[in-house]
């Protein structure tokens, strides 16, 4: 079964890092996070929030998303995140954004603000000018459930 969606710009919107372990870091989502939202052809949708954050001298990408519409759309949204990439100045930094926290749909009305976003390091340093170019690249077109 094929599904398609249309991307809708959400908004361009200081996060404090909270170490959970030696490897895992999370930040609280606030108005400084960028976002994307889309609606599937059916009843499902996704809202994602992300931000580039410098932690210990390395660029980290922090993010979370929420689903609506049931299991079928959760599966499709997970596939979108699997195929999504993070780019800076057009150069791919990270593949597969399934590490983003999945947040309860009850937080959708507040655009996930106050929820925790999972972070992953890119292993590089970046200037504020470079950070300003960070974006999620999501393939448009048809997705299939795995």
Image: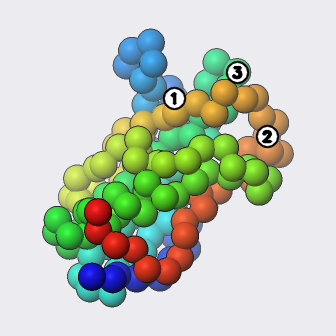
Q: Nearer the viewer, mark 2 or mark 1?
A: 2
Element class at badge 1: loop
**Residue 56 x %, y %:** 64, 18
What residue is shown with label 3? 57
Q: Residue furthest bottom?
A: 41
What residue is shown with label 1? 16
Gap between marks 3 and 2 measured at Cα:
12 Å
Rendered position, 110 above or below 5: above
- The crowd level at tag 2 (other Cα within 10 Å; few <14, some 14-19, many 20+) is few
In this rendered view, identify the residue nearer to me: 23 or 103. Answer: 23
Q: Nearer the viewer, mark 3 or mark 1?
A: 3
Along the horizontal axis of the image, is 109 left or right of 69?
A: right
Q: Are marks 3 and 1 in contact (CB under 8 Å)?
A: no
Q: Is residue 67 visible?
A: no
Q: Are marks 3 and 2 in contact (CB under 8 Å)?
A: no
Gap between marks 2 and 1 measured at Cα:
17 Å
Q: Earlier in the sequence, mark 3 or mark 1?
A: 1
What residue is shown with label 2? 128
Element class at badge 3: loop
**Residue 71 x %, y %:** 17, 65
| Residue sitting at x 77%, y 34% | 126
In this rendered view, identify the residue nearer to me: 146 or 139. Answer: 146
Q: Earlier in the sequence, mark 2 or mark 1?
A: 1
**Residue 34 x %, y %:** 56, 56
| Residue sitting at x 79%, y 53% | 89
**In terms of image quadrants, where is residue 47?**
bottom left
Rendered position, 14 above or below 108: above
| Residue sitting at x 39%, y 15% | 21
Quarter containing the N terminus: bottom left
Along the horizontal axis of the image, is 60 left or right of 142?
A: right
């Amino acid at each position: 079964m094929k599904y398609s969606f249309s991307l809708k710009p959400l908004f361009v919107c200081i996060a404090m890092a909270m170490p959970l372990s030696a490897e895992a870091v999370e930040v609280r989502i606030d108005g400084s996070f960028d976002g994307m939202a889309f609606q599937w052809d059916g009843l499902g949708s996704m809202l994602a929030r992300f931000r580039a954050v410098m932690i210990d001298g390395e660029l980290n990408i922090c993010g979370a998303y929420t689903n609506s519409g049931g299991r079928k759309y959760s599966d499709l949204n997970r596939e979108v995140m699997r195929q999504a990439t993070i780019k800076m100045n057009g150069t791919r930094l990270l593949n597969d954004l399934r590490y983003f926290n999945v947040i309860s749909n009850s937080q959708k009305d507040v655009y996930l603000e106050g929820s925790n976003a999972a972070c992953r390091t890119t292993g590089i340093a970046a200037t504020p000018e470079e950070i300003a170019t960070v974006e999620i690249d999501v393939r448009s077109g048809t997705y299939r459930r795995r």
